[in-house]
């Protein structure tokens, strides 16, 4: 998974997530609530790759202004 804040986003709250398989931009598919209060966020790619991320990790990525992801 690669996230970059240097790419123009449709929403600044959603980081750019690049597919680990093909490198294309992944689309936000689903946000599912979890029992522990954290949510699971699912990204999907046209090549069929699916990436799941917790809301806590997602929030940390969205706040990170470096390009290390």
Image (tube, helix red, strand yellow):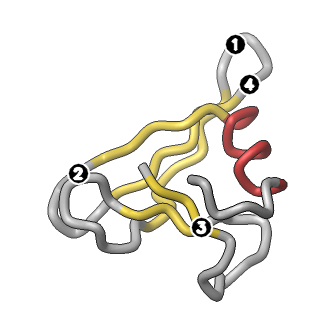
Residue reaching furthest left? 47
Which is in the foreground here, disc 4 or disc 1? 4
| Local secondary structure at mark 3 | strand
Give the percent coordinates (x, y) of residue 42: 47, 46
- Image coordinates of residue 25 in percent, x first then y, are 39, 73
Disc 4 crowd, CA 10 A, few/some/many (<14, 14-19, 20+): few
Does label 2 or label 1 sit earlier along the sequence? 1
Q: Residue 47, located in which quarter of the rendered image?
A: bottom left
Q: Which mark is residue 4?
A: 3
Front tag of 3 and 4:
3
Return the residue at label 2: 49
The residue labelled by disc 4 is: 38
Which mark is first along the chain, 2 or 3? 3
Asked if residue 14 is positioned above or below residue 33 in the image, the reply reads below
Instruction: Identify the residue shown where x is 44% and y is 67%.
Output: 27
Q: Is 48 situated left or right of 12 in this image? A: left
Residue in view at x 60 percent, y 45 percent: 31
Callout in the foreground (3, 2): 3
Q: Secondary structure at mark 1?
A: loop
Identified at 45% across, 37% down, the residue is 52
Residue 56 position within the rendered picture, expressed as x and y whole percent measured from the top left? 75, 33
Mark 1 → mark 3, Cα distance in angstroms: 29 Å
- Residue 10: x, y in percent? 66, 84
**Chain-order first, disc 2 or disc 4:** 4
Label drawn at residue 35: 1
- Quarter of image, res 53: top right
């Amino acid at each position: 998974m690669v996230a970059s804040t240097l790419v123009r986003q449709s929403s600044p709250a959603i980081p750019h997530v690049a597919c680990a398989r093909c490198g294309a931009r992944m689309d936000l598919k689903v946000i599912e609530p979890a029992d522990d209060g954290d949510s699971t966020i699912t990204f999907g790619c046209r090549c069929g790759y699916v990436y799941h991320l917790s809301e806590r990790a997602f929030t940390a990525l969205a706040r990170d202004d470096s390009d290390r992801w």
